[in-house]
């Protein structure tokens, strides 16, 4: 907090609020309130998922079974009035099962394209690590370019297109390691942990009392797709000082030179850090980015992109822990 106060005084003391945040703050607060009615706790995960959706990025949600990963994805689609689709990844899933296929229409003697589940606004890919590399590759184009090419014909996705994928970190039987090129296309890897004891009691109380338990079908949309796009357009007005751009570049450079890291962050990661920090600043009711915003969004952006050396893994380091240490090495702008 002290870092934020110092930065605000030294850099933005005489700057007036350039963007009217009233409407934005009202919509975001409505989203938070509706999410809290359905999901108990998970405040950090909720904030990071909202940040990704606002920043036009895909999210990989990781957690053990039963911590509301799937519910989180479905709830986000419900609240944004988005066209929602779900695909369950399994070892026998084929690319055509995901993208769609061309079928001969016997009545017209022409080929018709039947859209796969990726054709929606928000797509939930459940247990994404259960499909082999061939099926994973089917997502490469649509995740990066928001389009699908089948039989030489390219079909564009909507402007709000977002993939929310889930995976179980503990069960390895029947799973496949996601390709690095695909992992790099996820803006963040968000971890959903167990609730605290107090939160667990609240979950039980809600299930014990039907009056306190809110079902997903009872949730009404809070914002339209048009309003979401309007909120995204406000990111262009968020001010990022050049010293903060150098701060981001310095963190990325650390990942490429560290002895503990075999493969560092890509330029796509640096862009993700910039966009996510701008979105996170808006969520906090500001139209300027602070170093704390960058420090908050960077660990979930880096943890799934870094490949550690064998020595670092043998010493018990995780990618998240290494990412945090590398961030701390970079001098914070004053």
Image (cartoon, rainbow, N blue to C red):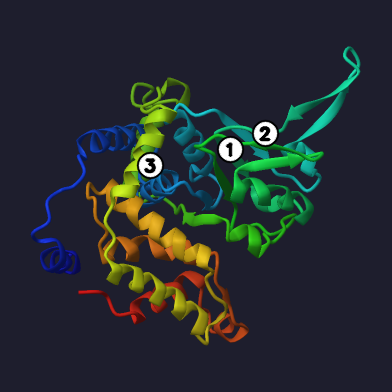
To which residue does mark 3 refer?
Answer: 232
Query: Disc 3 versus disc 1: distance between alpha carbons?
Result: 19 Å
**Rendered view: 89 above or below 190:** above
Image quarter of the C terminus: bottom left
Query: Tag 2, which secondary structure?
Result: loop
Earlier-in-chain disc, 1 versus 2: 2
Q: Nearer the viewer, residue 109 or 36?
A: 109
Assess whether mark 1 and mark 3 are in contact (beta carbons under 8 angstroms). Answer: no
Cα distance in 3D space between marks 1 and 2:
7 Å
Q: Residue at x 53, y 79 (%)?
A: 316
Crowding near the residue tagged with mark 1, few <14, some 14–19, many ≥20 C-alpha atoms within 10 Å: many
C-beta proximity under 8 Å, tags 1 and 2: yes
Write down the residue under mark 1.
Answer: 123
Image label count: 3
Q: Secondary structure at mark 3?
A: helix
Q: Residue furthest left?
A: 14
x%, y% of residue 21?
A: 21, 40
Which residue has dot 2 on it? 117
The span from disc 2 to disc 3 (Cα, nearest Å) is 25 Å
């Amino acid at each position: 907090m002290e870092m934020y106060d110092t930065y605000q005084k030294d850099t933005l003391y005489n700057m007036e609020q350039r963007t009217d945040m009233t409407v934005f703050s009202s919509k975001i607060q409505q989203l938070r309130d509706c999410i809290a009615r359905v999901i108990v706790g998970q405040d950090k995960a909720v904030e990071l998922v909202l940040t990704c959706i606002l920043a036009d990025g895909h999210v990989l949600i990781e957690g053990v079974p039963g911590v509301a990963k799937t519910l989180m994805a479905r709830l986000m689609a419900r609240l944004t009035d988005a066209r929602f689709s779900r695909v369950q990844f399994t070892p026998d899933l084929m690319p055509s099962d995901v993208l769609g296929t061309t079928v001969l229409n016997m009545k017209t003697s022409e080929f018709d394209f039947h859209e796969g589940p990726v054709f929606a606004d928000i797509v939930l890919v459940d247990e994404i690590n259960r499909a082999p590399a061939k099926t994973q590759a089917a997502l490469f184009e649509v995740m990066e370019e928001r389009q699908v090419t089948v039989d030489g014909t390219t079909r564009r996705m909507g402007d709000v297109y977002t993939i929310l994928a889930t995976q179980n970190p503990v069960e390895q039987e029947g799973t496949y390691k996601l390709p690095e090129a695909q992992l790099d296309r996820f803006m963040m890897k968000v971890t959903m942990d167990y609730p605290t004891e107090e939160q667990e009691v609240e979950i039980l109380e809600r299930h014990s009392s039907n009056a306190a338990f809110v079902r997903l079908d009872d949730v009404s949309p809070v914002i339209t797709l048009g309003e979401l796009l309007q909120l995204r357009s406000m990111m262009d007005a968020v001010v990022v000082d050049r010293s903060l751009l150098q701060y981001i570049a310095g963190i990325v450079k650390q990942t490429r030179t560290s002895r503990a890291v075999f493969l560092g962050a890509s330029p796509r990661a640096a862009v993700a850090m910039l966009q996510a920090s701008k979105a996170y600043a808006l969520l906090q009711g500001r139209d300027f980015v602070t170093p704390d915003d960058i420090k908050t969004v960077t660990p979930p952006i880096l943890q799934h992109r870094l490949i550690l050396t064998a020595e670092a893994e043998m010493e018990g380091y995780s990618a998240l822990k290494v990412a945090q240490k590398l961030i701390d090495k970079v001098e914070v702008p004053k």
